[in-house]
Structure formats: structure tokens, C-alpha cells
Image: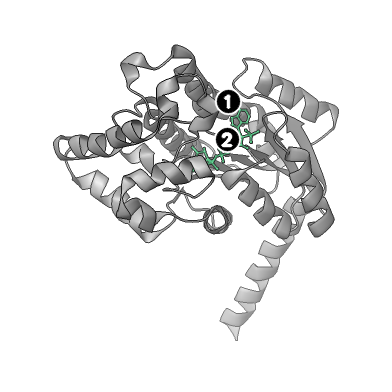
Amino acid sequence: MLPMLLMMILRSLRRSKVVALQQHNYTLITGASSGLGRALAYACARRGYNLVLVSLPGEGLEAVAAYLRRHYGVVVHTYETDLTRQSAVYELHAWMERKAITVGILINNAGIGGTRAFDTAPPDYLERIIGLNIRALALLTRLLAPQLAACRQAHILNVSSVAAFAPIPFKTVYPASKAFVYTFSLALRHELRRTPVKVSVLHPGPMATNTDVNSRLGTHGILARWSTLSTGQVAEIALRGMFDGKAVIVPGLINKIARGLMAILPHAITLPLVALIFSKEIKNTTDHETGTDYRSEWLAG
Ligand SMILES: NC(=O)c1ccc[n+]([C@@H]2O[C@H](COP(=O)([O-])OP(=O)(O)OC[C@H]3O[C@@H](n4cnc5c(N)ncnc54)[C@H](OP(=O)(O)O)[C@@H]3O)[C@@H](O)[C@H]2O)c1
């Protein structure tokens, strides 16, 4: 009898916190026009959360927002910007202040990568990866931290990758940027442990996000195909983990095993193997050799 009563009290406390999160604050998702970001937006809207969606201009973000308003009755604001621009994160923050939008959940999802030989990669390509995956993520988190800490309950979900767990030749900067997201998130989680803000970091493995990623995954062999999850599956696992207050979320059994192996195997063994896999990707993907279209290089982790 007593345990049941306790369970009921806990459940209703949890429900009242969720209602407070849904009604008074927005969930901000970067990179929400496609891929995992869009799946996270759908999953949040289904749960009744009002949204601020951010992505690059001209990629159909308003259509995503209109669908969510119509189907789930939530309030959705959209903001289109290139987050790699120096002032973009400050402008986004100022726009939110003007609109009196406060955020209770921040999902730093936007991220880019690519596969290139480092010594011939255009510097601009490296700058964009660092600018989006590291600078924009850390800065947006910093600017929104005070309002998150003022909530009764708040969450930050940073999207890293299984690539964060190993150095990857021919990707070099991408896995290093995702390793930043990993350690940044764990350190921030500790720093904010006495506030209502719970920080989680998500490490997806391969996801079938677009045709470009799909064709690349084709070059990685059977294991990559087995470990590929849909964005909808990853979004659900991510939100469940985040609301449960998990520190590290690794979706899928194969990705969990990969993480474990990377932790125990010496680099002398893993580096040549990984280099072999990704050098094949360069050979099989002609657009990497053109050196011009970075936007087509969204990359599986
Ligand atoms: N796909 C995978 O297999 C995989 C594996 C592990 C980790 N991840 C990580 O998961 C996250 C989502 O990946 P995804 O594959 O779903 O990506 P995606 O389909 O390429 O979508 C990326 C999103 O980020 C936005 N974006 C890109 N550059 C931006 C910029 N400069 N400023 C603002 N927004 C920008 C895009 O906006 P537009 O649509 O307007 O371009 C889009 O909404 C990334 O952090 C990625 O590193 C992906």
C-alpha cells in the first residue's frame, strides 16, 4: 500500500514538472529542418512541447513548423540562420529576448562533418565544422544557461556521435569536434549538478538521414548497415534518456558494443582499421574530390 502511494505521489510530481516545462518554456532545437533534428522536433511536438526550430535559410523549416502546429496544436517559432557566422548565435539570442521566448529544453543537434584528406581539405571546410559543432554549440549553451537554470526543471541535450569515442583518419576534425561535445557535456553536467538543469549527451551511430549519408554507409560494410537506426528511433531513445536524466545516451546495441571496444582496444589496432574504412569512403564518393560542396557532406558519425 505504502509503496503504491509513494509511486503515485512521484508520478504526479513528475507530471506537474512536465506540464510546467510544456506550458511555460520552449524547446529549442538546432538543425531542425531535416534528419535527426526534424525527428526530435516531431517527437517533442507529439509530447506537447512548444518549439523554437533553427536551421539554415531556405530549407523548408517553415513547412516543418506548419505541419507540427496543424497536427499537434503546439506553438512553433522558426529562426533561419547560418550558425557558423560569428554573430549568428548572438542574433538568435537577441531575437528570443525581443519575443520574450524562454527555453526550458535546449537541443544542440546541428552538426556537420565530412571525409577528406586533412592536408588537402580547404581551410573553410574545417572552419565550418569547428564553427558549428564546437563554437555555436558552446556559445548557445552559454547564452541560454541563465534562463535554463531559472526553470523548475530544465534539460540540455547535446548531439555528439559514436565518432567521439575514437580518432578517425580522413575525418580528423569531425570526431575531434564530437569528442569536444562529449567532454564539454559531462563537465557542464557536473558544474550544473546543483541547479535544475540536467545535461545529457547523445552518441548516435549511423542514421539513414539522407541519400548522401545512405550511399556513404553503403561503403562501410555490413556492420554499419546493421547498426543503422532511423532518425525516429534515435529521437525516441534520445528523449527518453534525456527525460530520465541520463548523462550519456548511446542508441542501439551495436553502437554500445563499438563504444566498449573503442575503450579497450589500443589505437595501434583501431587506427589502421578505421583508416581503411574511411579511405574507401573517399575513393567511392566523387563529391569529396570536387572540394566545393560542403553542404553535401553531412556525415554519418
Ligand atoms: N547522420 C548520421 O549518421 C549521424 C551519426 C552520428 C551523429 N550525427 C549527428 O547528428 C546531428 C544531426 O545529423 P543529421 O544527419 O540529422 O544532419 P542533417 O540531416 O544533415 O541535418 C542537419 C541539420 O543541421 C542544420 N544545419 C546545418 N548547418 C547549419 C548551419 N551552419 N547553421 C544552422 N543550421 C545548420 C541543417 O539545416 P538545413 O536543413 O537548413 O541545411 C539541418 O537542419 C549532427 O550533429 C550530426 O553530426 C549524425
Secondary structure beneath dot 1 equals helix
Q: In the image, what residue occupies the spot 65% across and 24% down?
A: 82
Seen in the picture, residue 263 relative to 80 is either above or below; the reply is below
Give coordinates of residue 165: x percent, y percent. 33, 40
Q: Residue sitting at 49 percent across and 14 percent down?
A: 124
- The quadrant in which the C terminus is found is top left
Badge 2: few (under 14), some or many (20 or more) residues near its Cα, within 10 Å? Answer: many
- Do labels 1 and 2 touch, CB within 8 Å? yes
Give the spatial CA distance, label 1 vs label 2: 9 Å
The answer to whether residue 265 is seen in the rendering is yes
**Numbered label attached to residue 136:** 1
Query: Is the residue marked 2 within 8 Å of ligand 1, measured from its CB?
Result: yes
Name the N-terminal-most of marks 1 and 2: 2
Side of 288 relative to 14 (left or right): left
| Numbered label attached to residue 250 | none
Res. 216 image quadrant: top left
Query: Is 297 left or right of 66, judged from the image as shown?
Result: left
* Extreme residue in the bottom direction: 1
The relative height of residue 101 versus residue 123 in the rendered view (above or below) is below
Which residue is disc 2 drawn over? Answer: 110
Secondary structure category for the residue under label 2: loop
Query: Which residue is nearer to you in this view: 193 or 299?
Result: 299
Q: Does ligand 1 reach within 8 Å of label 1's beta carbon?
A: yes
